[in-house]
Image (tube, rainbow, N blue to C red):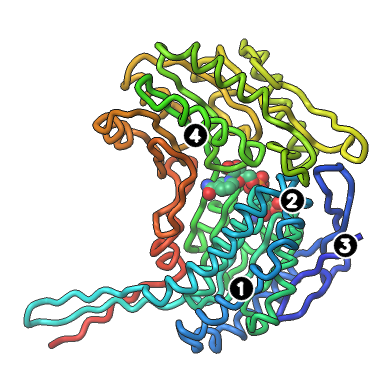
């Protein structure tokens, strides 16, 4: 049994209350370790440590902090295999995906923000002969970061890297469902030279640890990625305290396939955008909208490809889909498939749990599922399922495609497939989404603004937006 610990004030320690929670391996459905069942007392200890550490961390300056964060990036890279195995074991995702995407991206997050801070500009505004204004951007102090289970280290570091680079100290909570790589990271901090108290990692349940971070009066900024319902609860608590909030929430992303697209490229990428990480990426396209003239051709070719995907052992390099993250989540996703059937949808492939052999018999696997025959207003096409399930809907013309695409409460990402450049520009402009990919998916430049509209969130992360979020702007006006 692995025993995970909190990182508070540079020390690895159990929860003050002494309680533990089980951690499961989705591939086998078994318990492999335990993590501290922390509460507000652990959060309090961390907040105090972070406030003590803040003046020296801030005084280190951009160069000093950059050097330390680059060392941390290197330490992760030196242990890439260990991190990738842990991420796959904890989350159920294919090891090949963790090795190729999750861990390299976590390293890139630290490298990117460690160097971005060196180039973070401040503005000056000259008023002819009257005065000069300059914008002084200072770190907030101590901030709270809360992240989800789907891309555990990738999204955890996407928050803590800019927060630390900007000069803040951090109290962070990874998802209790996937705590392992955050714990592994905490074991590297001392070696990398992160001073005690600068980064504190508290494990435990959302309603205890997450809620304590959200409500803590000495954490004036909260960066959260997770479900829309949790985001609403965080906003409810934090807004009357006038906290700065960044909320990256759920999605129900449309993929718009026009008849003039590069069919082969579209098909290949749409299989990926539907089922990578078992469909558990907030950017996955879950509603595929297809121009009617190619609907049947698309449906048949797509279903054939999806049937050929291999659901299997996450450590097998030939596996396309591993396990979904938890038993509860598996039941939730299977429940949505039943709902789709009861709403009149036709399951074209998948639609059930997959039972593997031997050690994997009790693992939480779902066959990639494609559903057709449902209109835009049913729950299946309105609610986020966040699993290996997509629906197909035909459309007639551009206006119909845009109306269908925008017909949910969400607005995170969308994908357009067309060879017509003018149409791509028009449709991209008209989509209610924070992110639009044209003829591609998941190409990420860390300098670009990342986030959603409507119920997909508030604020933007990435590049200069993240550094601005984690600093307070002060205008200084000098009379000439
Ligand atoms: P949750 O909202 O359930 O949890 C996210 C984090 O919040 C976890 O660490 C969780 O802890 C914690 N939490 C739970 N309750 C509270 C609370 N009351 N106060 C403070 N923190 C709390 O999301 P999931 O982990 O299930 O992640 C999946 C969701 O994340 C999907 O909706 C997905 O779309 C979204 N997401 C959005 C992204 C974006 O960039 N827009 C990117 C990736 C995912 P614990 O796990 O311990 O309960």
Task: Estimate the spatial distance between the alpha carbons at disc 1 and disc 2, rounded to whole Å.
Answer: 21 Å
Q: Which quadrant would residue 284 be assigned to in this image?
A: top right
- Confirm or deny contact between disc 4 and disc 2 (CB under 8 A): no
Q: Give the percent coordinates (x, y) of residue 106.
A: 59, 61
Query: Measured from the top left, where is residue 170 in percent x and y?
Result: 60, 72
- Measured Cα–Cα span from mark 4 to mark 2: 25 Å
**Disc sitting over residue 74 in the figure:** 1
* Chain-order first, disc 4 or disc 1: 1
Disc nearer the start of the sequence (4/2): 2
Element carrying mark 4: strand
Q: For the residue carrying disc 2, how many other residues have a C-alpha within 10 Å: few (<14), some (14-19), or many (20+)?
A: many
- Of discs 3 and 2, which sits in the foreground? 2
- Location of the N terminus (image quadrant): bottom right
List the residue tagged with mark 4. Answer: 253
Q: Compare residues 37 and 298 and report the one nearer the observer.
A: 298
Q: Are marks 1 and 2 in contact (CB under 8 Å)?
A: no
Contact? badges 4 and 3 (CB < 8 Å):
no
**Disc 4 and disc 1 in contact, CB within 8 angstroms:** no
């Amino acid at each position: 049994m692995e025993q995970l610990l909190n990182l508070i004030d540079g020390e690895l320690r159990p929860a003050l209350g002494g309680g533990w929670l089980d951690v499961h391996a989705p591939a086998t459905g078994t318990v492999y370790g335990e993590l501290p069942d922390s509460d507000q007392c652990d959060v309090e200890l961390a907040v105090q440590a972070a406030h003590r550490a803040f003046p020296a961390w801030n005084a280190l300056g951009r160069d000093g902090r950059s050097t330390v964060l680059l060392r941390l990036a290197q330490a992760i890279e030196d242990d890439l295999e260990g991190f990738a195995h842990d991420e796959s074991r904890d989350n159920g995702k294919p090891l090949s995906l963790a090795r190729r995407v999750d861990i390299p991206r976590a390293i890139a997050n630290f490298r990117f923000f460690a160097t971005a801070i060196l180039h973070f500009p401040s503005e000056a505004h000259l008023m002819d002969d009257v005065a000069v204004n300059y914008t002084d951007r200072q770190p907030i102090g101590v901030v709270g970061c809360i992240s989800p289970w789907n891309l555990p280290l990738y999204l955890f570091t996407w928050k803590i890297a800019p927060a630390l680079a900007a000069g803040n100290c951090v109290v962070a909570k990874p998802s209790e469902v996937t705590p392992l790589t955050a714990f592994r990271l905490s074991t590297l901090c001392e070696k990398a030279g992160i001073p005690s108290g600068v980064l504190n990692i508290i494990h435990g349940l959302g309603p205890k640890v997450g809620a304590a971070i959200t409500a803590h009066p000495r954490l004036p900024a909260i960066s959260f990625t997770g479900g829309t319902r949790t985001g609403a609860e965080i906003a409810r608590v934090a807004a009357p305290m006038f906290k700065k909030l960044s909320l990256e929430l759920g999605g129900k992303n449309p993929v718009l396939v026009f008849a003039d697209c590069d069919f082969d490229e579209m098909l290949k990428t749409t299989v990926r955008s539907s089922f990578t990480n078992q469909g558990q990426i907030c950017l996955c396209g879950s509603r595929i909208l297809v121009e009617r003239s190619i609907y049947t051709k698309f449906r048949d070719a797509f279903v054939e490809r999806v049937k050929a995907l291999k659901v299997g052992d996450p450590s097998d390099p030939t596996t396309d889909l591993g396990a979904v993250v938890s038993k509860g989540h598996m039941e939730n996703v299977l429940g949505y498939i039943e709902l789709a059937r009861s709403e009149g949808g036709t399951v074209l492939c998948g639609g059930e749990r997959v039972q593997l052999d031997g050690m994997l018999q009790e693992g939480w696997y779902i066959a990639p599922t494609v559903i057709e025959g449902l209109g835009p207003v049913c729950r299946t096409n309105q609610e986020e399922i966040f699993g290996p399930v997509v629906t197909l809907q035909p459309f007639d013309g551009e206006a119909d495609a845009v109306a269908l695409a925008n017909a949910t409460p969400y607005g995170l990402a969308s994908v357009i497939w067309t060879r017509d450049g003018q149409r791509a520009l028009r449709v991209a402009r008209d989509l209610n989404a924070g992110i639009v990919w044209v003829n591609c998916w998941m190409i990420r430049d860390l300098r670009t603004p990342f986030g959603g509209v409507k119920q997909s969130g508030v604020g933007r992360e990435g590049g200069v937006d993240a550094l601005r979020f984690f600093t307070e702007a002060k205008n200084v006006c000098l009379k000439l």
